[in-house]
Amino acid sequence: MPVVSAERFATGLTWGEYLAGATQHQERRREIYESVTFTPEQREALAALRPLGLKVLVLEEYWCGDAARTGPVLARMAEEAGMEARWFFRDQNLDIMDQYLENGTSRAIPCFVFMTRDGEYLTHWGSRPRAVKEAARPLLPLPPQGDPARPAAFERFAQVLGEAYDKVMPHGVIDELLEYVNTALKAKG
């Protein structure tokens, strides 16, 4: 069964449309997108995906800092691999998001849903690279809103996330996404 109908997939925004409408983190997204490079091995792996005509449905929101980092990497990767990518706002598409909850409970974004050319599910990835999740894990959960300890805890959390992202951007993210896609393709046969 397709993740979404072809008609619904076509209603998603292209990367250019999504970026042009960004109300937050627009410059960061643009800078990351323009700075993405690929290793020779990554170019080869992405070229091997071109004939498959894969699709990727991206669930994000403009305010999400994680999406502002990885969404542009996904956009460049999709272009390089000849994937049709469409962006959907999570909060307007909870019926899709609720199929891909992180840990079965969280509507964490970004969420990248990879599909065949016919829209059949392959795999999904989100919401942060493994190394970033591991770096952040000791700092979670954050104190609740209104707790006097929250601002300092959040500041430390943001610092740790930023340092972890700096270590994996963009090549570690690309490698992880390729691993997800290629593992799913092998399992599909």
Image: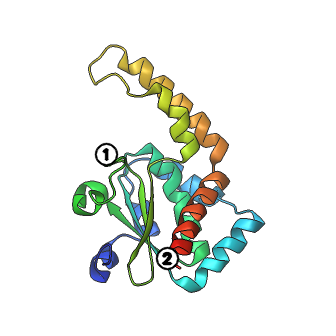
Label 1's element?
loop
Q: Residues within 10 Å of mark 1 (few under 14, many from 20)?
A: few
Residue 81 drawn at (x, y percent): 59, 75
Residue 98 drawn at (x, y percent): 26, 57
Please state which amino acid type lies under the numbered disc 1.
Ser
Residue identifier under label 2: 188
Between residue 70 and residue 122, name the one nearer to us: 122
Q: Residues within 10 Å of mark 2 (few under 14, many from 20)?
A: few
The residue depicted at 60 percent of the width and 37 percent of the height is 164
Relative height, residue 99 to residue 53 (above, below): above
Between residue 9 and residue 62, name the one nearer to us: 9
Please state which amino acid type lies under the numbered disc 2.
Lys
Which numbered disc covers residue 21?
none
Between residue 74 and residue 35, name the one nearer to us: 74
Answer with left or right where residue 132 lies relative to residue 19. right
Of all residues shown, which one is farthest toward the right?
A: 40
Label 2's element?
helix
The residue depicted at 44 percent of the width and 83 percent of the height is 117
Residue 179: quarter of image: bottom right
Residue 50 drawn at (x, y percent): 59, 81
Question: Which of pointers 1 and 2 lies earlier in the amino acid sequence?
Answer: 1
Residue 186: quarter of image: bottom right
Instruction: State the quadrant of the N terminus.
Output: bottom left
CA separation in Å, label 1 and label 2: 27 Å
Which numbered disc covers residue 106?
1
Residue 134 drawn at (x, y percent): 54, 37
The residue depicted at 60 percent of the width and 64 percent of the height is 178
Relative height, residue 56 to residue 156 (above, below): below
Residue 43: quarter of image: bottom right
Relative height, residue 149 to residue 33 (above, below): above
Q: Are marks 1 and 2 in contact (CB under 8 Å)?
A: no
